[in-house]
Amino acid sequence: MTQAIDKHANVIWEGRYQPIHRGHLAYIEMLLERAHHLWLFVVMNETSRDAGMSLEHLPVPEFTREVDPHHVPEKNPLPFWLRYRLVAETVRSEFPDAPVTVWGGRRLDLAWPLYTKAFPPDRIFLTPLRDTFEDTKAAAWDKLGERVLRVDVSHLPAISATATREALRNGTAFEKFLAPSTVAILEETGYLDTLMALR
């Protein structure tokens, strides 16, 4: 069951967006109906080892251990600068004038002291009720003393970045996965061809 969100809260949702797709956009639309301001945080592609950090010195090592495998190069074909642009411009195109701030950088678990100061104090971390990965993420934010709410997303389209990239590789109707502004940026930068050529 979806929990209530204070309409005056700053809702934070972080992700890789490899690339941003219509599943993300449906979730963003749902969050915008419930939040005063939405902060979308685009995370860099790096593992704790890449960052030169050891688990015992990180605030939520159990989360870092689980999230690291999702940040290996083969799962992240798009560079940070492009994903940041895709999120910022796609959200602006799909939700003009919406109260959204797009921000990004090192993963939150790898730079937590910075983000405790940089995020607005009246904040809530939203995590979908979807899988064990999201359960671990929610537990991590809770352990860090953050306000965490779980959101039922069972009614949203079951679209993933992996399925989107597969549609691009197979030459199927990828437009059903991506917004026109996303496709335009991927074409302009040459990364549409890159994604279509992935094996």
Image (cartoon, rainbow, N blue to C red):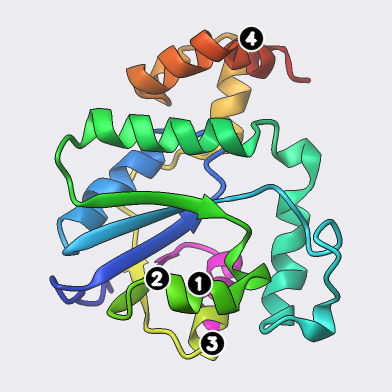
Q: Residues within 10 Å of mark 4 (few under 14, many from 20)?
A: few
Residue 83, percent from left and from top: 53, 35
Mark 3, mark 1: which one is toward the viewer? Answer: 1
Mark 4, mark 2: which one is toward the viewer? Answer: 2
Q: Is mark 4 on a helix, strand or loop?
A: helix
Q: Mark 3 points at which residue?
A: 144
State how far apart marks 4 and 2 are (Cα). Answer: 36 Å
| 2 and 3 marks in contact (CB < 8 Å) | no
State how far apart marks 3 and 4 are (Cα). Answer: 41 Å
State how far apart marks 3 and 1 are (Cα). Answer: 12 Å
Mark 2, mark 3: which one is toward the viewer? Answer: 2
The amino acid sitting under disc 2 is Phe
| Position above or below: 197 against 90 | above
Residue 89, percent from left and from top: 35, 30
The amino acid sitting under disc 1 is Tyr
The numbered mark, 2 or 3, whose residue comes first in the sequence reads 2
The numbered mark, 3 or 1, whose residue comes first in the sequence reads 1
Q: Mark 2 points at which residue?
A: 119
**Does the magenta portion include 129?**
yes
Q: In this view, does 95 lie to the left or right of 188?
A: left
> What residue is drawn where x is 46% and y is 12%?
173
| 3 and 1 marks in contact (CB < 8 Å) | no
The numbered mark, 4 or 1, whose residue comes first in the sequence reads 1
| 1 and 2 marks in contact (CB < 8 Å) | yes
Q: In this view, does 147 lie to the left or right of 77?
A: left
What residue range appears in magenta? 126-139
The amino acid sitting under disc 3 is Leu
Where is the C terminus found, in terms of image quarters?
top right
Q: Residue 193 carries which label?
A: 4
| Position above or below: 38 against 196 | below
